Amino acid sequence: MTTDTVAAAHPHGISGGMTFLMAAACGILAANLYYAQPLIALIGPDVGLSESTASFVVTLTQVGYALGLFFLVPLGDVLRNRRLILIAIAANIFSLALAALVPNAIVFLVSAFLIGLTASACQMVIPIAAHMATDAARGRVVGNIMSGLLVGILLARPLASLVAADFGWRGMFVLAIGMMVVLGGFLFQMLPERHPAAPLPYGKLIASLWTILRDSPVLQRRTAYQTAMFATFTLFWTAVPLELASDTFGLGQRGIALFALAGAAGALAAPIAGRAADRGWSKTGTGLSMFLVFAGFALCLFGTWGSLAALVVAGIGIDLGVQGNMVIGQRAIYGLNPHMRSRINGIYIAIFFLGGAVGSAIASPVYSAFGWPGICIIGMAMPLAALAFYATEK
């Protein structure tokens, strides 16, 4: 099918069942990026990684995902989308199996990289939904699907901790393989085919990424907003387990997992933000999202005095703001050029994902040097910077 034929085949928009399937696909794929993060202390000794090198597992997964966004996701603009996604899912299953059966450190690090690379397929699904949705409902549809992706991200860490507590870290990867096999079966049966009408040679396709970003002020602005916001998201969720495990709260692994489950309520922002964007409230929604993140980190200061309730409410508020801003941004960029949606989406996600990598990278050293108040101050500064840039929007 050509791009136009896909839209013509769904004149009334995307069905609720298909929206749910795509949301589940995005959530299950994205969750694969995060299972290893809370299990490093278990994985390292088992495969022969030293304490100083175990963090490379997380780094290589993130690097693989970023490279997938830049070099695989744009293929959605030139190749049959259904086939591309199914191949990526098969490769992801292989990568998870490699991790589950891994005999040594080198093989596990390779598998971590491949898991991240192939999990980028979640960002191949969203542009298909954007093509199937009507113009009036595109924000709502993208928001609903993004809520699935965000639930997957937020639940991955607590799920991994709980499964590993009873079945070991390899048990989590076996469970992930099972979920991916089931997902692949459903997508094979139900995902519609979309064949772009005017494919480009791969070299020109990748070269066009810079041109698209350079020539699109909307994409530049929305990417800048979300880069700052996503940095706060990863800053919070990387640092808060350290604070929860400290003498102030003294929570164990299960308690920290339950805290992360409470934070998953922030995923409710995605469909709400999508509906607001459809109604023309994007500018107001953007400012509100940034303020929520600022207020959340201000509330985090009460955690210094042992208020767990304040941290729970702050976590939900931060998630609401970050996810709301992301969906509003996607609604805006998907309206730029229907024939470039995969590339536009890849640029947007890849750049703000790098911002997230910065947030997670500075979390431990800032917490070590300045404690929880240092995290809160930096967390407030980032959305304030985004608000300052937002104030220049015409």
Image: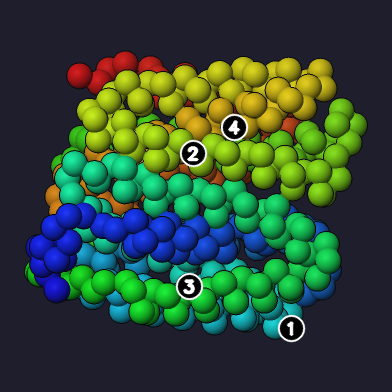
Label 4, label 3: how far apart the Cα atoms are: 28 Å
Label 2, label 4: how far apart the Cα atoms are: 10 Å
Which residue position is annotated with label 1?
103
* Residue shown at 70% from the left, 83% from the top: 101
User: Considering the numbered disc 3 on the image, is that residue within a helix, a strand or a loop?
Assistant: helix
Q: How many marks?
A: 4
Three-letter residue code for mark 1 = Pro
Q: Quadrant of the C terminus?
A: top left
* Residue shown at 83% from the left, 62% from the top: 165
Label 1, label 4: how far apart the Cα atoms are: 39 Å
Q: Quadrant of the N terminus?
A: bottom left
| Place of residue 31 in the rendered image (x, y in percent of width and height, measured from the top left) | 56, 59
Q: Earlier in the sequence, mark 2 or mark 3?
A: 3
User: Considering the numbered disc 4 on the image, is that residue within a helix, a strand or a loop?
Assistant: helix
Tell which tag, 2 or 1, sits nearer the viewer: 2
Relative to 116, say whether 154 is above or below: above
Q: Earlier in the sequence, mark 2 or mark 1?
A: 1
| Place of residue 128 in the rendered image (x, y in percent of width and height, measured from the top left) | 27, 61
Three-letter residue code for mark 4 = Ile
Q: Earlier in the sequence, mark 2 or mark 4?
A: 2
Q: Is residue 231 left or right of residue 164?
A: left
Residue 259 picture quarter: top right
Which residue position is annotated with label 3?
183
- Residues marked 2 and 1 touching at CB (< 8 Å): no
Tell which tag, 1 or 4, sits nearer the viewer: 4
In the image shown, does 312 or 355 lie closer to the viewer? 312
In the image shown, does 260 or 340 lie closer to the viewer? 260
